[in-house]
């Protein structure tokens, strides 16, 4: 059975088979809807069901609460149509011009700037170029058929290979290998780019960037691209971590702040008890943002990192700081345990 799906306000339409998700069918039809994890764990693909019925599929309650479901929200990465469907969701433009590729790559170098963070630099095949928007991610294709997703940390304008920041998840099928047996020149295979986390260039609003842990990776890509393009918008980055050692590239945003008058950097530690020399901000990183920006009604927010940080920021920024719901963009770093 094939059902018609209409997107508002663009009024674009596409067909979706009953056993397919709304997101998969949309992407095949080159209708680009917001998405992130594609596993019902992050909530980035949330849309309003205006007409019709869907099978909601399997998802995490933090990605779609019961109250949201009652109000007509659905996750397009999980929902399957039970008949003709009409959705209200902001369609994205430009991504359809970027091809999704499968290709091998060679590990050029691996560095560990923190005990649980590895920076991988990967060399692409000769004459191959990976087009992507700053903020997108790739998926490694593992031998058992599973996949692992990591954000690109370098900017699109930078020639050569690609850079990834990977946090060790003990017991993780891929990260255990990265932190134990992975060697330079190892061959890996990936597909990408994916995701709709990127700077919206159609806005001139000042930007608040929020990163926790290795959520710094896509923020790094986004900012380096903005600096390269001489973007004149105001940017402020709040990077949260447990200890100072976890701010594994601390010198880089400090350097950016010295070089760009429209950029400010605020590091925040949640566990500074052993950091007797730390004179910076402490506590939860999203609360530091709220202290400095009690009114976010005229801002855009781009947030990356642990799901609990993203969820707290999205909830509190809207409820307490007046951030419009459609001006919060996120890349929630869900693990296999989260999914």
Image (cartoon, rainbow, N blue to C red):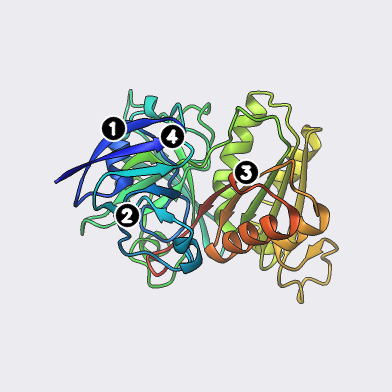
Tag nearer the camera, 3 or 4: 3
**x and y, in percent, of residue 324 in the image:** 66, 47
Q: Earlier in the sequence, mark 2 or mark 3?
A: 2
Q: Residue at x 26, y 54 (%)?
A: 142
Which of the labelled discs sits on residue 29, or is there none? 1
Q: CA distance from mark 3 to mark 4?
A: 32 Å
Residue labelled with disc 3: 327
Q: Residue at x 41, y 55 (%)?
A: 74
Q: Are marks 1 and 2 in contact (CB under 8 Å)?
A: no
- Residue labelled with disc 2: 79
Residue 50 place in picture, x, y as percent: 41, 47
Q: Residue at x 38, y 72 (%)?
A: 171
Quadrant assignment for the C terminus: bottom left
| Residue 240 lies in quadrant | bottom right
Question: Do the numbered discs 1 and 3 sit on residues whose CB atoms are within 8 Å?
Answer: no
CA distance for labels 2 and 4 = 36 Å
Q: CA distance from mark 1 to mark 2?
A: 17 Å
Q: Is residue 142 visible?
A: yes
Q: Which residue is mark 4?
A: 161
Q: Nearer the viewer, mark 4 or mark 1?
A: 1
Disc 4 from disc 1: Cα separation: 30 Å
């Amino acid at each position: 059975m094939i059902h018609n799906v209409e997107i508002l306000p663009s009024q674009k339409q596409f067909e979706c088979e009953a056993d397919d998700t709304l997101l998969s069918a949309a992407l095949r039809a080159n209708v680009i809807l917001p998405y992130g994890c594609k596993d019902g764990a992050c909530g980035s693909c949330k849309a309003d069901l205006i007409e019709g019925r869907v099978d909601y599929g399997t998802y995490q309650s933090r990605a779609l609460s019961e109250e949201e479901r009652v109000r007509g929200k659905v996750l397009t990465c999980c929902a399957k149509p039970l008949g003709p469907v009409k959705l209200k969701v902001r369609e994205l433009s430009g991504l359809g011009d970027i091809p999704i590729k499968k290709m091998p790559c060679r590990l050029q170098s691996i560095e560990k700037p923190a005990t649980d963070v590895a920076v991988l630099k990967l060399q692409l095949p000769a004459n191959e170029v990976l087009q992507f928007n700053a903020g997108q991610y790739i998926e490694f294709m593992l031998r058992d058929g599973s996949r692992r997703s990591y954000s690109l940390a370098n900017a699109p304008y930078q020639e050569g290979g690609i850079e990834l920041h990977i946090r060790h998840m003990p017991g993780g099928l891929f990260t255990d290998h990265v932190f134990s047996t992975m060697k330079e020149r190892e061959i890996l295979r990936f597909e990408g780019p994916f995701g709709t986390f990127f700077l919206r260039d159609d806005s001139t609003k000042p930007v608040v960037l929020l990163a926790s842990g290795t959520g710094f990776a896509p923020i790094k890509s986004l900012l380096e691209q903005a600096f390269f393009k001489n973007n004149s918008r105001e940017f402020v980055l709040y990077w949260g971590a447990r200890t100072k050692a976890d701010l594994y590239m601390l010198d880089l945003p400090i350097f950016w702040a010295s070089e760009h008058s429209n950029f400010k950097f605020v590091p925040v530690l949640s566990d500074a008890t052993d950091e007797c020399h730390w004179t910076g901000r402490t506590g939860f990183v999203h609360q530091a943002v709220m202290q400095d920006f009690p009114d976010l009604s005229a801002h855009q927010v781009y947030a990356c990192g642990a799901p609990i940080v993203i969820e707290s920021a999205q909830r509190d920024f809207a409820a307490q700081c007046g951030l419009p719901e459609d001006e919060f963009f996120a890349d929630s770093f869900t693990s296999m345990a989260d999914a």
